[in-house]
Amino acid sequence: MENLENDKITLPKKPEGGRILALDAVRGLAVLGMYIQHFALNQWNSDLVSGNTMILFMLCSGISYSLMGAGARRKGMAQEQLRTRILSRSILIDLAGYFLILLNGPFGVVLPAYAMLFLLAMPLYGRTEGQLLRLSCLLYVICPPLMIIGLSLFSGAALLADIAGGPLSALAWAPIFVVGMAIGRMDLRNRKLPARLAGTGLALLVPVKLFCVTVLPQLRMMVENWMVQAMAASGGEIDPYAVWPRNTQPVQWHMLFVEAPQGGSLFELLTGTGLSLIVLGCLLRLGQKKMDAVLKPFAAVGKASLTLYMAQFVLAWVLQLAGIDVTGLEIGSIPFGDILVACAVLAAGCLLARWKEAPMEWAVRRFEKVFLGHGRREG
């Protein structure tokens, strides 16, 4: 049976204790941002958390994806076993995502796209750090327009929409996920790496943000005017009963020039990537300085990220059943309301840390063992 060995790849050093505390803390910070975005958004935290928290989470997911493959290679795991592990994890996460969609809550669910990313990225396990970085640059250019086209063409097809159907599809998050995979190939204990990451993030964030403020509004207006003229020239309404793709809506090209949260545009991805690299670099540096007391509460949330991610949808569903509109609570307008929400999530993470594994994380591992055990019996 073929093992996961590749001479082209330099495996990152195995982290002490099997986990990287700072990486868990970054993931936990992303989950905190999601709760603030959904329950306590206000004018002060909006620019910081809206959309950026999901980009940060996807960056961490790409890093963990590479580390999972590196761990499999160290253990001599066969390619078939690793593929089975990824497939089982993707199936369970996908089912969990559709369950959350069934609840019909007020928040967008990204778990199906997250599951699709795990599957689509499997061929990239054999790629080197440099190849992944070059690929990510290409994806930043081609994914936004393809995602916008997919939003028009695949809106009626659930699986295809999860892959390439708009801002919450796998294709929309693929660039940052591949960047995370490249970072996961690096030595995360290297003392120079945090400064490199933070410096790269700053060099990316500042010029892109200036461009978004000064030039992007004019570009968006030009594209919107062109779309209005093109629609008027076509002179026909869309027939929803026509055969595909004649029944699809026009491609929303103006979305490429909007720096909106979870809009999937190049500019939103670049600003979010820059900010995420700064956060990742800063927390890795704290980890190198042995600031465990600062990182541990956030790391507790990060270790239970899937459980806590799902919990916010279930909480919103329960409140809506009780007649409480989550979006109308306006906790963010209360003094320090966003901090109170963050503290509540930190407390929940610390409580879950008393268990060996959080419920959803435990379910994922059990599901993997069932698949792997079946594969060994078949072998």
Image (cartoon, grey):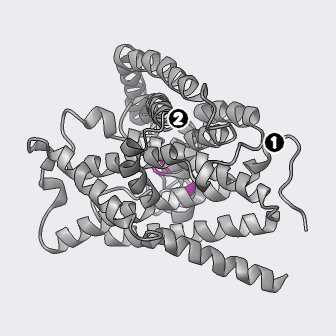
Amino acid at dot 1: Ile
Residue 34, given in percent of the width and then of the height, sits at 33, 49
Residue 159 locus on image (x, y percent):
56, 63
Magenta span covers which residues?
Answer: 161-168
The crowd level at tag 2 (other Cα within 10 Å; few <14, some 14-19, many 20+) is some
Identified by mark 2, the residue type is Gln
**Residue occupying the point 46% across, 32% down:** 256
Work out whether 274 lies above or below 25: above
Query: For the residue labelled by badge 1, is the local secondary structure a helix, a strand or a loop?
Result: loop
Quarter assignment of residue 144: top right
Are circles 2 and 1 on residues that touch, CB within 8 Å?
Answer: no
Image x and y of residue 297, in percent: 36, 51
Q: Is residue 260 magenta?
A: no
Locate residue 199 relative to residue 358 in the image: left or right.
right
Whether the magenta-drawn stretch holds residue 163 is answered as yes
Image coordinates of residue 75 in percent, x first then y, are 78, 61
Q: Which residue appears farthest toward the left when viewing the image?
A: 334
Dot label at residue 9: 1
Q: Residue at x 24, y 36 (%)?
A: 45
Q: Quadrant of the C terminus?
A: bottom right
Q: CA distance from mark 2 to mark 1?
A: 25 Å
Quadrant of residue 358 within the rendered picture = bottom left
Question: Looking at the rendered structure, which numbered label has been put on residue 288?
Answer: 2
